[in-house]
Image (spheres, helix red, strand yellow):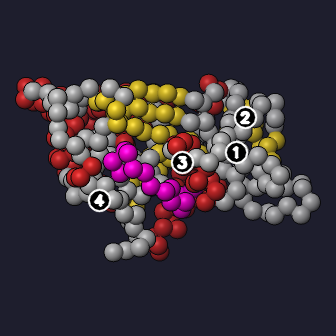
Amino acid sequence: MDPWVPVSGCGPQCVPPERDRVGAVRVAGRVSALVLAGLILLLVGLLTPALPRRVRTGYWRCAARACLRTVGLRVAVTDHRPRGARAVRGALVVANHISFLDVFAVAAVAPARFVAKREVLAMGALTPLLRCFGVLPHRRGLLRELRSDVRRVARILDRGRPVVVFPEGTTRCGIAAGAFRSAFFQSAIDAGVPVLPIALRYHRAGTTAVAPGYLGEDSVVDTLRRVLRSRGLVVAVTVHPLQLPAGDRRTLATRCGDLIRPERAPRAWAVPVRRSDLVVGIGPGRPPAAILDGDHVRVSRQRRLHRAGAPSTRGDERCLESTG
């Protein structure tokens, strides 16, 4: 067993016996709708590169919701960001990982490129859809390739394009949770962009649902079969405030993990920052994180290391500028 590859203890034992299933007619209808929607979305999606970014983003957001709806999943979004901060582009988006359906759940709120294990692109019929959602293949366990993958993500972020990473490195049932691996958080620090934590939870009538989990030796068909047969599934998408790329990557990973899994958080990390605060220091004696507020606030990579003796490392200080 490779010690560098994350391992999940979740498997078929996490899935309870199926109850209150929908009928065969409903399942057939969902399958037909999924196939039809997939074909339409792919054909229209080929035209989106020629469209303005706002139109393209809106299309993929609606397309992701449509894909989830066809399999019987309703999307419920709770957004804790200040309204002005929702226009920030180029953020590193991080989320907990439960299922391959997470790609669509996150895209329903924040369409972006996705970092995923290479095996995801070998999922048969779903491969074209996943490619349209911009999946960036990553080979887990190969440290010699990790640095180049991190740099590739940093370059995409530096161009103002958002990228999604699942830092747990593998899927879990939704009840269990894993620690956040810190490697790709370095991309946000190197590019000088904020991190957007998103928490995902699948539930039915308020109770955590394990059926959508991509667990153990599950195939795509196994997971889809459970979802298609289930009644009343909801994926709750909770968007947390943007986090400045403060400190080292391990601190940043822990901070975002605590926001996504509040039951494991020892303290609150987010510190409000007024829009009038043009310069926010991030170093000894300064707040470790900040909520970006105001209209169209972005993080630039301008550094003002005016403090005597301040180390000249990337990410020590950043300037909040209003672009509105």
Seen from the viewer's position, the closer of residues 298 and 26 is 26
Seen from the viewer's position, the closer of residues 178 and 137 is 178
3 within the magenta span: no
Report the amino acid beneath label 1.
Ala
Question: Which residues make up the magenta segment?
Answer: 172-185
Please name the residue that numbered disc 1 is placed on: 289
Foreground: disc 4 or disc 2: 2
Q: Which residue is drawn at 76% across and 46% down?
A: 287
Tell me the number on the disc at residue 264. 3
Report the amino acid beneath label 4.
Glu
Q: Is residue 167 above or below residue 93?
A: below
Residue 92 seen in the current view: no
Within-10-Å neighbours for mark 4: few <14, some 14–19, many 20+: few
Q: Is residue 90 above or below residue 51?
A: below
Q: Residue at x 61, y 60 (%)?
A: 250
Q: Earlier in the sequence, mark 3 or mark 2?
A: 3
Within-10-Å neighbours for mark 1: few <14, some 14–19, many 20+: many
Q: Earlier in the sequence, mark 2 or mark 1?
A: 2
Tell me how far mark 3 sits from mark 2, CA to CA.
Answer: 22 Å
User: Which element is circle 3 on?
Assistant: helix
Q: Earlier in the sequence, mark 4 or mark 2?
A: 4
Q: Marks 2 and 4: in contact by CB < 8 Å?
A: no
Tell me how far mark 2 sits from mark 1, CA to CA.
Answer: 8 Å
Tell me the number on the disc at residue 119. 4
Please name the residue that numbered disc 2 is placed on: 272
Q: In which quarter of the image is the C terminus?
A: top right
Report the amino acid beneath label 2.
Pro
Q: Marks 1 and 3: in contact by CB < 8 Å?
A: no
User: Which element is circle 4 on?
Assistant: helix
